[in-house]
């Protein structure tokens, strides 16, 4: 019985597959569109790219991008079109601006600070090490030990 | 003492930044269109498909553009406020019915009241894209020169109206 129901469900769901598929398009256009869309953020579901998202808006924007590619627009023009409307937020790689300086250069600044701190610390450590010359007895013991060892190896 | 001062300092700085981060709303993306001229569009009207709504004709007026759709749940929330605002007659509200079916949009206005002086019917959602619409409802305040002065993302609230939109409208109408 369950199998029959499942079969019926599958059968009835089949026709809906093909309804929303867009008309066949040029593979080169599609490839360029996907490459662009992967670098752009979907605003509805913010952790997905325009290429991944199933939202209505993402679909519309992919259609717009396709249309612009067919119209012969350059990649930069297409990206600008979206940035003009939705802001830098759509870019997964934000441009370098005064507000994004920290984002771009913060890690390097931290690395530099860490490096300086490490250098200062090591330098201070070095100064803390005091040279204490060996006393006569110590020297004699070391020499004795070294001679014994030298004898072993010889 | 100094041994503990460092980690404590770092912890406090981190806690402050993370605390500020909690208050941000990632769903509200600031629009780059604020302070810029609103996109010019003309679309058939929802109620009268043979008549064209042209945004150019709105120059010289302060107006609200409310983007809505019958399929949008949050629009249900703000609709009574819009009706009330229209009744008060402070500022004309124009609608943009976004990616909707005409009969559904008409039904919505019939059932819930029509606060709009006119409604443009954006079936393909293309005008929505020009306005950077990504979540319905959205409401734009547009000044006499056709410049977008404010954008409300998500449903209008009494608080947003009282604290931001109405003061701004009064200022612009002066």
Image (cartoon, coloured by chain):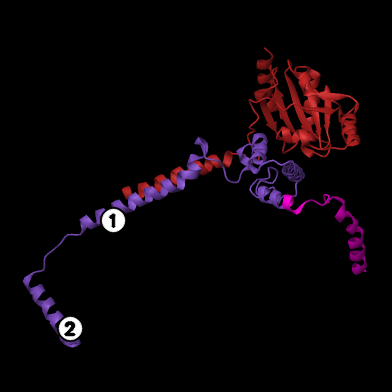
Chain colours: A purple, B red
Nearest the viewer among B11 and B56 is B56
Nearest the viewer among A95 and B121 is A95
Residues drawn in magenta: A1-30
Q: SS at mark 1?
A: helix
Residue drawn at (78%, 26%) of the image: B82
Q: Dividing the picture into quarters, in which one does residue A91 lie?
A: top right
Nearest the viewer among A51 and B23 is A51
Considering only vertical position in the picture, is A137 above or below A152? above
Considering only vertical position in the picture, is A33 above or below B46? below
* Image location (x, y in percent) of residue A112: 38, 48
* Residue located beneath label 2 in the image: A149
Q: Which mark is residue A81?
A: none
Q: Is B5 inside the magenta-drawn segment?
A: no
Which secondary structure is most common in the magenta stretch?
helix
Residue drawn at (67%, 37%) of the image: A81
Instruction: Farthest residue to the top: give it.
Output: B174
């Amino acid at each position: 019985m369950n199998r029959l129901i499942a079969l019926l469900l599958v059968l009835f769901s089949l026709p809906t597959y093909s309804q929303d598929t867009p008309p066949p398009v040029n593979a080169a256009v599609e490839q360029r569109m996907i490459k662009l869309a992967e670098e752009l953020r979907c605003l509805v579901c913010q952790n997905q790219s325009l290429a991944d998202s199933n939202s209505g808006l993402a679909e519309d924007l992919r259609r717009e991008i396709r249309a612009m590619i067919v119209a012969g627009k350059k990649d930069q023009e297409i990206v600008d079109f979206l940035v003009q409307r939705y802001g830098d937020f759509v870019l997964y790689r934000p441009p370098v601006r005064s507000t994004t300086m920290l984002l771009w250069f913060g890690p390097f600044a931290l690395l530099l600070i860490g490096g300086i701190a490490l250098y200062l610390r090591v330098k201070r450590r070095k100064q803390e090490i005091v040279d204490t010359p060996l006393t006569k007895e110590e020297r004699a013991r070391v020499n004795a030990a070294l001679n014994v060892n030298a004898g072993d190896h010889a | 003492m100094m041994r503990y001062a460092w980690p404590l300092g770092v912890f406090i700085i981190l806690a402050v930044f993370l605390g500020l981060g909690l208050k941000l709303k990632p769903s509200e993306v600031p629009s780059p269109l604020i302070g810029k001229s609103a996109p010019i569009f003309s679309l058939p009207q929802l109620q009268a498909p043979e008549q064209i709504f042209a945004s150019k004709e709105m120059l010289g007026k302060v107006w609200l553009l409310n983007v809505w759709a019958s399929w949008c749940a949050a629009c249900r929330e703000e609709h009574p406020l819009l009706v009330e605002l229209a009744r008060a007659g402070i500022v004309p509200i124009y609608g943009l019915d976004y990616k909707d079916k005409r009969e559904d949009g008409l039904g919505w206005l019939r059932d819930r009241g029509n606060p709009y002086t006119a409604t443009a019917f954006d079936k393909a959602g293309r005008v929505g894209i020009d306005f950077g619409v990504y979540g319905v409802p959205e409401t734009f305040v547009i000044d006499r020169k056709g410049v977008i002065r404010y954008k409300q993302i998500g449903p209008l609230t009494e608080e947003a109206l009282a604290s931001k939109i109405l003061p701004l409208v009064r200022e612009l109408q002066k």
